[in-house]
Amino acid sequence: MPPADSALFPVPDGARQYARRVVLLTGPSGSGKSSLSRRLGLPVVALDDFYHDVDAPGLPQRFGSVDWDAAGSWNHGAAAQALVTLCRDGDVEVPIYDIPTSRRTGTTTVVAGDSPIVLAEGIFAGELVDALRAEGVLADAVCLVRPRVHTFWLRLLRDLAESRKRPSILIRRGLAHYRSEPAKVRAWVAQGCRATTPARAEADVRALLT
């Protein structure tokens, strides 16, 4: 990944113009990122689709398996480039990732249309703040927060319903998320995201559209 002060695409100074900007949505797993994206009805890039395949070399490990909560399990550079391409061109091909099997299964095209705002949501969104700001496409970076117990149960119910992993793994990871959530929120804020509730974030994004 290029440093934050370099361009993803080599163009002359002052020539980089984009018709769209990105709102990054991050927060604990189960905090409401996907639900907020659906309510807003804007073009969305799901950052979870940029996970590496389970057999990619050098993936971080925890509890005897891949640590999917570590940034090293995720393709930062490909995600950043896809978002800049979407803002520049109005469409971009992105991967389709199957979480239960931990593999990329194909591709799809995200089309921005005439929307001036596109959303990028996922637990690693904060990793993109500096790169998108340097490219001039960052509209906002939001970390969704709500009571930890609420988030824990919503996350567990969602993951069980979607059969994301074995129940024992989901419960163990859920408890680990619960304990680490305050520190993670502080880390996202340190990356440049602002912590707010889903309701406040929805109002703020709608304000950007007007």
Image (cartoon, rainbow, N blue to C red):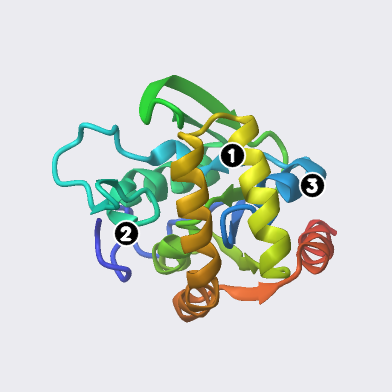
Identify the residue position indicated by label 3 in the image: 40
Residue 43 in the image, given as x and y percentages of width and height: 67, 39
The residue at 45%/57% (across/down) is 124
In three-dimensional space, the C-alpha distance between marks 3 and 2, rounded to whole angstroms, equals 30 Å
| 151 or 108, nearer to the observer | 151
Identify the residue position indicated by label 1 in the image: 159
Query: For the view shown, which residue lies furthest in the top direction?
Result: 106
Q: Taking 11 as reference, is 2 left or right?
A: left
**Which amino acid lies under the numbered mark 2 shown in the image of this protein?**
Ala
How many numbered discs, if any?
3
In the image, which is nearer the foreground, mark 1 or mark 3? Answer: 1
Q: Taking 104 as reference, is 178 left or right?
A: right
Residue 174 in the image, given as x and y percentages of width and height: 53, 55
**Which amino acid lies under the numbered mark 3 shown in the image of this protein?**
Leu
In three-dimensional space, the C-alpha distance between marks 1 and 3, rounded to whole angstroms, equals 23 Å
**Which amino acid lies under the numbered mark 1 shown in the image of this protein?**
Asp
Marks 1 and 3 in Cβ contact (< 8 Å)? no
Q: Secondary structure at mark 3?
A: helix
Query: For the view shown, which residue lies furthest in the left direction?
Result: 57
| 116 or 42, nearer to the observer | 42
In three-dimensional space, the C-alpha distance between marks 1 and 2, rounded to whole angstroms, equals 37 Å
Residue 93 in the image, given as x and y percentages of width and height: 45, 28
Q: Quadrant of the N terminus?
A: bottom left
The answer to whether 14 is drawn above or below residue 43 in the figure is below
The residue at 44%/43% (across/down) is 169
In the image, which is nearer the foreground, mark 1 or mark 2? Answer: 1
Q: Secondary structure at mark 2?
A: loop
Identify the residue position indicated by label 2 in the image: 7
Q: Quadrant of the C terminus?
A: bottom right
Which of the marked residues, 3 or 2, is nearer the chain's N terminus?
2
Which of the marked residues, 1 or 2, is nearer the chain's N terminus?
2
